[in-house]
Amino acid sequence: MLNRERLQDGVIKHIIGRIANGVYPKGTRLPSERRLCTEFNVSRGTLRKGMAELRRLGIVTIRHGSGCYANRLLKPALASYGFTRKGQARVSLNDIITARQAIELAAVRQAVHIIRHSTIRRLTRLIDQMVDTVDLTKSIALDMQFHQILVAASRNPVLSAAFEAIQPYHKYSQIFTSYGPREKEMTLAHHRRIIRALKQGHAVAVLKALSHHLDVMKEYERVKKEKNHESDCQ
């Protein structure tokens, strides 16, 4: 039962995240039950319970015979599922990425000449797993693991501890940057460039690839804010 409840919460959080980041704008009809069940790897019963909770919170409208439609997000609904935790609510995605840039770029600068071949193989396997999975939760976990291994490859315990310290904020931000197929392919391309540069032992290329990857995430926040502003003006 506990596991089923966690799956239900996962459905709720991912749909909230997609509405928040504009994947499902206000008034948009959500994908079919079958497609969502496949994507989230849950049963139809679990999905329906999640949708019922989203309807109760006013996040979606269910029209019988027509489908499920996204509404505008309200703060009380977000608070119900921990999206406005004290401290995290005041931290923007831009703040988190800036911190990650400071930590990760310093880490790869140290890692590029000392990284083990076995570590590069682990990173490559993570990319292969990301390619194979259609589960959004798993994709996010694999993405985070990729960056954790990159930082650990520096063999600098201070950088590893600093990266670990921002993990709660990192996880908080992930739900609002849940990516669709296009974003996933872009992330995979960035990760492949990072690995290619690591194999070559090319420090400048590694830093350039990782810096670009993180800059794209900052750009995502800017575009999201513009979309939200346009929505508010309508």
Image: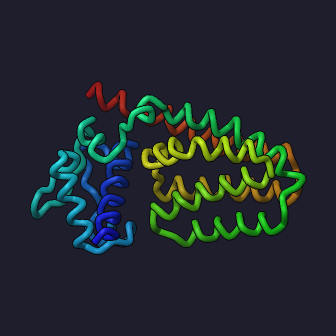
Quadrant showing the N terminus: bottom left
Residue name at image x 10 percent, y 61 percent: 64
Q: As displayed, is residue 133 above or below residue 76?
A: below
Kindly give the residue lying farthest to the top in the view shown. 233
Q: In this view, does 173 lie to the left or right of 40?
A: right
Looking at the image, which is closer to me, 179 or 13? 13
Q: Which residue is drawn at 59% across and 70% down?
A: 129
x then y, percent, for residue 202: 88, 50
Q: How many marks on residues? A: 0
Judged from this view, the residue extending furthest toward the left is 64
Residue 26 position, x and y percent, is 26, 42
Residue at figure coordinates x 26%, y 28% from the top left: 234
Q: Which residue is drawn at 32% across and 49% down?
A: 16
Q: In this view, does 4 lie to the left or right of 192?
A: left
Q: In which quarter of the image is residue 30?
A: bottom left
Give percent across and percent down for residue 74: 25, 37
Against 103, residue 4 (above or below) is below
Q: What percent of the width, then of the height, locates residue 58? A: 18, 45
